[in-house]
Amino acid sequence: MTNCIAFHSYKGGTGKSTISSNLAALMATQGFSVVLLDLDVYAPSLQTYFNTRPRKWINDFLFDQADLDEVIIDSNSILINFLKENGNTDNKTISNLDKGKFYVGFSSTSKEDIYKLDGFARQETSKVQLLRKFIMMREEISEQYDPDYIIIDTSPGIRYWSINALAVANAILLSLKMDGIDIEGTRILSKEIYSSFAKLGTQAYLLLNRIAGYCHPPTLLPQNENKSNETHSSTSTNTLYSNILNEQSSTITKLKEDMSMDVISSIPCYCDIQFDSREFLTSLKYPQHPFTQQLLDLITELEKLFK
């Protein structure tokens, strides 16, 4: 059975694309068959991540200008080449890629194509037609490729295309950072969007990203303080850090209670990953990195979820 997971968020910059692409690739190296879809139609990025320009886009499929097999690209070779380039030639990983499969469907970055989709979304008759195409795309992917997972990267916020993507998912992973705007926006989404899907049987979970707990903050003292006082400096930093962690823990507990949603994963802020030029496959480049372990744990949780 194919399980479909949609990554969504209230606003951009919460790590949806980085997490979804790393998760999908890591799943493939674990022997799963995975289809990754870029349905962030207003700001698609996966074609840049994977340095691929397909002949046909998801947009073409939605407008009956392409068959599914022209849109879904077999990308196993991209992962294998990336692993070899970075010295990760573990035989088990390579053999798992032979057993599993990694496919990607890309959305067009063309301004005209984006405007066209946006225009159709404003017409009531077209909305029904396009929703049917979304449903058909999922069904055809399941039938033709029989993947274990379909991973969807969606547009943030309450947009027509986001709602369509969420409508075809078994599970929604709501990615958010621990800032006030994101937390409050997530509460709004929970009341207006996720509760409706929950009534239809869709499971929704919080995926906390870039939380405190990995990168130790610098010493934060007023400029007129005596910076040579290292003991005072260290004590102030540790106190501040402890306060941040305590406040974050309280916020998470309240958020779970308010939204009646469990946290499926809490991923710390890994500054080294954020500034990696190829962060979309960090989990393959650095198999021993704690970020990779976080995603492996997430895969385990997803397996339990769909049992």
Image (tube, rainbow, N blue to C red):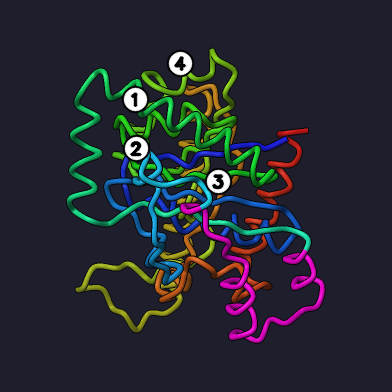
Q: Which residue is mark 3?
A: 151
Q: On residue 196, which mark appears?
A: 4
Cα distance in 3D space between marks 4 and 2? 16 Å
Which label sits on residue 188? 1
Nearer-N-terminus badge (1/2): 2
- Judge left or right: residue 189 versus residue 81: left
- Label 1–label 2 contact, CB within 8 A: yes
Give the residue displayed 51% in from the left and 29% down from the top: 168
Q: Which residue is mark 2?
A: 10
Q: Residue type at mark 1?
A: Ile
Q: Is residue 224 above or below residue 201?
A: below
Q: Residues within 10 Å of mark 3 (few under 14, many from 20)?
A: many
Secondary element at tag 2: loop
Was residue 148 drawn as part of the magenta stretch in this picture?
Answer: no
- Residue at disc 4, secondary structure: helix
Residue under the image location 77 percent in, 79 percent down: 90
Number of marks in the image?
Answer: 4
The amino acid pointed to by label 4 is Ser
Which residue type carries mark 3? Answer: Ile
Quarter of the rendering occupied by the C terminus: top right
